[in-house]
Amino acid sequence: MKLNANIPAGPLTQKWTTHKHEIRLVNPANKRKYDIIVVGTGLAGASAAATLGELGYNVKSFCVQDSARRAHSVAAQGGINAAKNYRNDGDNVYRLFYDTLKGGDFRAREANVYRLAEVSVNVIDQATAQGVPFAREYSGYLATRSFGGAQVSRTFYARGQTGQQLLLGAYQALMAQVSAGTVKVFPRSEMLELIVVNGHAKGIVVRDLIGGKISSVMADAVVLATGGYSNVFHLTTSGGASNVTALWRAHRQGALFANPCFTQIHPTCIPVSGDYQSKLTLMSESLRNDGRVWVPKNGGDKRPADQVPDNERDYYLERMYPAYGNLVPRDIASRAAKRVCDEGRGVGPGGRGVFLDFRDAIKRFGEDVVRERYGNLFEMYHEITNENAYKTPMRIYPAVHYAMGGLWVDYNLMSNLPGLFVVGEANFSDHGANRLGASALMQGLSDGYFILPYTIGNYLAQNQVKRPSTDVSEAKRAEQAVTERLNKLLSIPGKRTPADFHKHLGRILWDHCGMARTEAGLQQAKQEIAALREEFWRNVIVPGSHDDLNMALERAGRVADFLEMGELLCLDALERRESCGCHFRTEFQTPEGECLRNDAEYAYVAAWEFGGDGKPAVLHKEPLVYEEAHMAQRSYK
Amino acid sequence: MKLTVRVWRQKNARREGRFAEYEVQDASPDMSFLEMLDVLNERLIRQGEEPIHFDSDCREGICGMCSCVINGEAHGPESQVTTCQTYMRSFKDGDVITVEPFRAMAFPLIKDLVVDRSALDRIIQAGGFISVTTGSAPEANSIPVSKYHSDLAMDAAACIGCGACVAACKNASANLFVAAKVAHLNLLPQGGPEKDPRVLGMVEAMTSEGFGACSVTGSCEAVCPKGIPTSFISRMNHNFLTAALKLRVHGPRG
């Protein structure tokens, strides 16, 4: 298989403009003849569905939640980047492009990242016009703040609820299209299979989660906006419903899965408190603007934080990375936290935690200013831990947060399966081996509002395979396979619950494929996952039936796919014998313990093809060719 | 902690429901309320019984998916938190905890504690948006908004659409939900052109979905996990009156 990323020719700064001139358009009168399926209603899915509806396409939008407004984009706290240069601090499109590429440790596709930076400014305009209440200065103009991995202030925010407000903007645009009759939303519906006809993605099999009805929906193109797969780790900052099933089903039908081992561990989460824990909660990276991260200099120091004098505190990020200090990128901050805890200097129960301290910020600005900036985060911290972070420092520890990997797409955001488009976190995207803070919202909305609506037209205008009816044999076979699988899950006379298998899988991955990975550990994880999967299919217990709302059955199906995907994650981590961004192989590090990249051998996108059940996946490589940027050693010192 | 949990169990909308009692032996004060239910559900599944169905997703109090009336209060005993952010330290060892779904005519029951809140989506469809076609937006800083109004709009926009206000109201009114969205958009200059049709359309949709009239008791504000104040309802009533009068004077022009 030859991977063609379809990157337009010409200078980097002109590629997107030229491409928009050159791609085919669909005549306005013809747009209503096309049906498009959009799965997922987060930032990417809702913005794409709304915009496609505005353009005149017939859009069918699906989500597993009870309303489109619940998608997990809603939980993003800190902000959204854009190269507006409102602060006159030297920001521009090129700088945002370069920061993002460098932040991703030079493992992202250059042309995509440049386009992302270019489009970022339109996203802010669009959201503002929709009424997204971004923070403002007293002058009435938009405020910004700083985020990790950047030395300019380019992050727009709406208190600590930026994701919620941007999602509501996109959701409201979607609801406007529903009332205009161009979009139909199907909530509480789960895509369980992709239908491929003559090599083109032409439909999906959907289960109505309330009545259990299984049906095929056909379209001229299918857009997956189903978010990331980080819940494969079980304890993450994702919502409970976030899963890999849509992506994994598409992968099994031939779509390539790219860079699955690039999973982000976020440095500032509330530490685990017990075995019953269902999820981890993030404390926004924006807190690192004013909070200082430290641990006691000496291991075993059990004094309360306020009794540790300054000269016995180790502000280790400021010490190790003086140029960026507490604002180093996430992968670097996470590994540093792990290192100090491994040295026995961690704080809190089990010693897996570091302090994030606002004492100095409160002294400098007063408690009121800190409350205005981060009040809701302090409240959330209090609800969960019963501690007052205005008085004692927060305790934080890294947790799995985001998936940079995802389905492989070309410059048009189309997968290797014609007609299958993938947007937002679901694609392998623009973040390389590490995503910078406030870039996920930027990417989701850029894809949905400004990129996919153009590029999908290019496919439809040359659409060689017409929309088939639901009677085609491919659809019937897919429906049958879905029903058989559900029946099988319900008939296994096992003893362990789906959640128990999920927890077990998460533990394997966190231990061996988390912040530090080794050859031996990954080999072991692969074997353990294979054994767990084998056990799952004979020892899972799923009560109830499939013609009724059955959340245990939903969970079981998702865990079954995670059990396959988790093995691919380890395989990818094993094959990438270098360290880059979040992917840290302990065998490959500099004397200072930083990532040791190997550009000569690994400057490629690893795109995996499904090899069949029980057979190994097949690796395809898309070389990363940088025409403008220079692949530098990343330094934040 | 040892607890007795009385939960509303109902197989689906067609069957009758009833309270079922479960003993929970091993709850920890640091568990969230939903984690306590998770632990109970794991036990039920292992016994081959169907777990207690309840909605939840983000479990950090922002998606608005979790619901439940706990001991008679929507989202439980603590003020300004959702059910998912309610922790067992709010209860005592030996407590009997009663858990019910959000009850309202406009929220038909689906199963156990799960209800259908799609009526709230249909209210948004009736005007809860600013019509701006993608690509047609002006430069963001060309529309300055006073910090006062912007902050007030954000206070209203913080609504998570959970429907607790409806569940708490004896009339099952959605006034606080509608008022929050009307205020969010009508306070901003961007929302100005559609101000009147927005408030008229959304109020009409609320009525036709079967939500009741405002009970003027303030129970909505008391349970709102985001602390959205009823002053937004006064603001909506003012908007509504102005819009309705304009309609009478100038005719239906939007």
Image: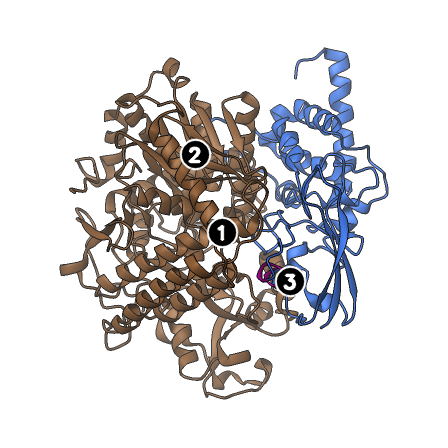
Chain colours: A brown, B blue
Horizontal and vertical percent for residue A462? 26, 22
Instruction: Report how many numbered discs are placed on residues in the image.
Output: 3
Q: Is residue B94 above or below residue A166?
A: below
Answer left or right for A382 relative to A51. Answer: right
Q: Which mark is residue B40?
A: 3
List the residue tagged with mark 2: A38
Along the viewing direction, whichever of A589 and B172 lies nearer the viewer: B172
Q: Secondary structure at mark 2?
A: strand
Specify whether residue B116 is in view: yes
Residue A173 visible in the displayed image: no
Element on which disc 1 rests: helix
The three-letter code of the residue at mark 1 reads Ser
Among numbered discs 1 and 2, the one appearing first in the sequence: 2
Residue receiving disc 1: A491
Task: Select label 1 or label 3 by which is in front.
Answer: 1
- Residue A614: image x %, image y %? 28, 55
Q: Main secondary structure of the magenta part?
A: helix
As drawn, the label of residue A597 is none
Q: Amino acid at mark 3?
A: Leu
- Distance between mark 1 and mark 3 Cα atoms: 23 Å
Residue in view at x 59 percent, y 83 percent = A304
Q: Residues within 10 Å of mark 1 (few under 14, many from 20)?
A: some
Q: Secondary structure at mark 3?
A: helix
Picture coordinates of residue A276, whole percent (x, y):
57, 67
Q: Between residue B171 and residue A339, name the one nearer to us.
A: B171
Query: What span is in magenta?
Result: B41-46
